[in-house]
Image (tube, rainbow, N blue to C red):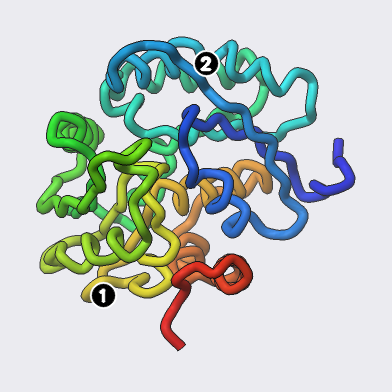
Amino acid sequence: MAVEYAPRGLLGVLTPQANTTVEPEFAALLPPGVAMLNARMTSAKPTIVARLLDYLASLEAWADQFANAPVGAIAFACTGASYYAGVAEEEAAVRRISAARGVPFLTAGHAVRDAFHALGARRIGLVSPYPQDLTDAAVAYWTALGFEVVRVSGSEVKDGVFHPIYAMSGEGAHQALLALDPQGLDAIAMLGTGMPTLLPIRRTPFHGGVPVLSCMLALAWRSLCALDSAPPGRDNLLAWVRGEGWGGRYQVRQASGGGAGLPG
């Protein structure tokens, strides 16, 4: 069933409660004819680990916010929960929600995994906005999926703000990407759905010839594959990395909103 503003498909998106990046980046990444419904996942747990795991444990409740809207897929725009829960628990959640809702349930972690597979990547580099314990969990997650994490670059976060990751700038994320040595890598992933990554990818889609992905880019790409019932493929993914389609929309949004954008 098509709706007025989503003739190509309606995507349900589950976003962490304070995340300020998911909706703006999806607004640029998703093509005309695709619309999104966003639902906020909330948790009163006192620590970040507990909140992330709470998001994953309560997926049925979060997905119920879409009620009977004709969403063609649901995107879980949170990677930290997958890292702490681990590969097996994430896979069980994907199967459970996909079966319950009758549509593909896509995690950001699985989207990046599928992107790595489409590229034939085994040796990967990571740009992490996380504190060390969450970075360690991320490395363990990617290792468990069969990838070799060769290098990790940390990004500078701001102290004394509402959330250190969501308050990051695209410029800071880009500098963290450039600080990662690409030698010997098959692909690079910029982690987290809260770190702004469209500016870095537009400026440096291939770092030393190595394709640069982010969790949000991969999740948008994989979600569109699901809505179109199309297999994820290398050529299609590389078009996303190059910014074909979304690059122009991003630039217009940045120009109209006073963002840093790209050098002329």
Q: Estimate the spatial distance between the alpha carbons at disc 1 and disc 2, rounded to whole Å.
A: 38 Å
Residue occupying image coordinates x 14% and y 50%: 152
Left or right: residue 5 compared with residue 82: right
The relative height of residue 223 versus residue 75 in the rendered view (above or below) is below
Amino acid on which the number 2 mark rests in the picture: Leu
- Frontmost of labels 1 and 2 is 2
Q: Which mark is residue 59?
A: 2
Residue occupying image coordinates x 42% and y 12%: 44
Q: Position of residue 195 (x, y in %)?
A: 37, 48
Q: Position of residue 229 (x, y in %)?
A: 65, 44
Residue occupying image coordinates x 74% and y 44%: 9
Amino acid on which the number 1 mark rests in the picture: Gly
Q: Which residue is mark 1?
A: 209
Of pointers 1 and 2, the one earlier in the residue sequence: 2
Image quadrant of residue 40?
top right
Q: Position of residue 215 (x, y in %)?
A: 40, 46
